[in-house]
Image (tube, rainbow, N blue to C red):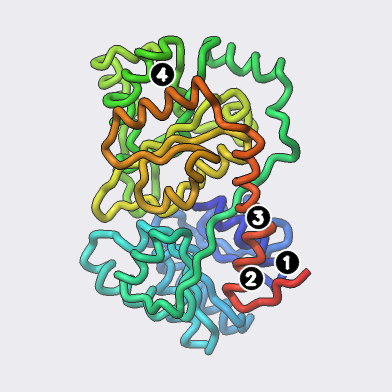
């Protein structure tokens, strides 16, 4: 989410003056082209109050044409302040921010999201959620998140990649990767319990590399733990086939993609906790790595069947295992996978965002 908003600000700065109001610590991460104001807190409650007061003060002085909320969580700030100064209010909705099961959020936040002049959504599935939340169809625009494309198609220095494998004891076998926060929706525990044993039975020396940690400061911060995943791995006799890397740097993540044979994305179908898009599937595709995923939420917008991966019906663990085994044994063409990711380049997405906001997106 933070990276997405960073890129949105950077891309929109090509078409207009952009100013960002963010939580404490965000200034150090801001694009050079973008002015940023920080709230003094990064905790949700205090941040929202401070953000509202600062946004109102800045808007009265700066008089922006558009006030954009980076998610439904900050939509009330954008809508109320925009109405106060006569600006347009825009909200970028991601999925979960339209389905939060909290009485106050549903009574206050969602009606204000629906009152925005434009609601940009990240997938076809999120568009449906926005319609159910009361957003008029003529105010909706679909703009998929963008991806940073690698500078070239090479996976990196082979010696560096080999050293990375040795450093993290990843072994010589096939590597499956999972990239994302350890939340129940992401389904890593269920994958380890229900799918990985079938893969290991056919590809015994494969290793699942898990990148990511538990979420903090999120709308739904429930998490799975390393310990709980390890416990089910021991019960399923696949503990030796799993490595946890936790939170890693961007350079290390590039290494992971460089050595991966397959990206697994076992997102679960959970009420009020949708997967709005599936950004990691696009990131993997940009490096020529195919994805196997369940066909839930906005994930189908991020995986091209038989081009960048395979989509499996929710709950079909044996089908997921079979698809993973097939792609490990007969990989898809890496160039075709990367070509699919080109559709999500930030250059293209930036133009789509500018057009959705009514800005001049011509070069």
**CB contact under 8 Å: marks 2 and 1:** yes
Residue 167, quarter of picture: top right
Residue located 69% across and 58% down the image: 347
Left or right: 173, with 218 as reference point = right
Residue located 66% across and 66% down the image: 351
Residue 49 horizontal/vertical position (percent): 41, 68
- Nearer mark to the viewer, of 2 and 1: 2
Instruction: Return the disc, 1 or 3, that comes first in the chain's sequence.
Output: 1
User: Are there few (<14), some (14-19), or many (20+) residues within 10 Å of tag 3?
Assistant: many
Instruction: Return the disc, 2 or 1, that comes first in the chain's sequence.
Output: 1
**Nearest to the observer: residue 344 or residue 219:** 344
Return the residue at label 1.
14
**CB contact under 8 Å: marks 1 and 3:** no
Return the residue at label 2.
354
Q: Which residue lies furthest to the left in this view?
A: 103
Return the residue at label 4.
242
Residue located 66% across and 59% down the image: 348
**CB contact under 8 Å: marks 4 and 1:** no
Instruction: Return the disc, 4 or 3, that comes first in the chain's sequence.
Output: 4
Residue 346 - label: 3
């Amino acid at each position: 989410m933070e990276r997405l908003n960073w890129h949105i600000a950077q891309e929109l700065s090509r078409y207009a003056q952009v100013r960002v109001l963010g939580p404490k610590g965000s200034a150090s991460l801001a694009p050079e082209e973008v002015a940023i104001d920080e709230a003094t807190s990064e905790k949700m409650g205090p941040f929202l109050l401070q953000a509202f007061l600062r946004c109102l003060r800045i808007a009265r002085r700066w008089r922006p044409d558009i006030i954009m909320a980076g998610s439904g969580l900050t939509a009330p700030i954008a809508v109320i302040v925009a109405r106060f100064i006569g600006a347009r209010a825009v909200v970028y909705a991601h999925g979960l921010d339209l389905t939060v099961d909290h009485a106050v959020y549903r009574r206050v936040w969602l009606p204000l999201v629906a009152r925005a002049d434009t609601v940009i959504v990240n997938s076809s599935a999120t568009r449906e959620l926005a319609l159910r939340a009361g957003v008029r169809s003529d105010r909706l625009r679909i703009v998929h998140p963008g991806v940073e494309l690698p500078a070239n198609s090479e996976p990196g220095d082979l010696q560096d990649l080999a050293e990375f494998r040795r450093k993290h004891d990843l072994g010589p076998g096939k590597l499956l990767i999972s990239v994302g926060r350890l939340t129940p929706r992401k389904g890593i525990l269920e994958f380890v319990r229900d799918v990985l044993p079938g893969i290991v039975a056919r590809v015994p020396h494969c290793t699942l590399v898990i990148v990511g940690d538990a979420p903090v400061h999120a709308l739904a911060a429930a998490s799975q733990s390393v310990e709980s995943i390890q416990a089910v791995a021991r019960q399923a006799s696949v503990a030796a086939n799993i490595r946890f890397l936790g939170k890693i740097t961007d350079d290390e993540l590039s290494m992971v993609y460089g050595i991966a044979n397959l990206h697994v994305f076992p997102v679960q179908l959970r009420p009020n906790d949708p997967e709005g898009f599936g950004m990691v599937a696009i990131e993997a595709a940009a490096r020529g790595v195919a994805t196997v995923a369940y066909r839930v939420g906005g994930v189908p917008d991020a995986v091209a069947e038989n081009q960048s991966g395979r989509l499996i019906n929710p709950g079909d663990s044996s089908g997921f295992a079979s698809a993973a085994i097939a792609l490990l044994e007969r990989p898809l063409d890496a160039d075709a996978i990367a070509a699919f990711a080109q559709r999500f380049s930030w250059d293209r997405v930036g133009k789509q965002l500018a057009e959705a906001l009514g800005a001049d997106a011509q070069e």
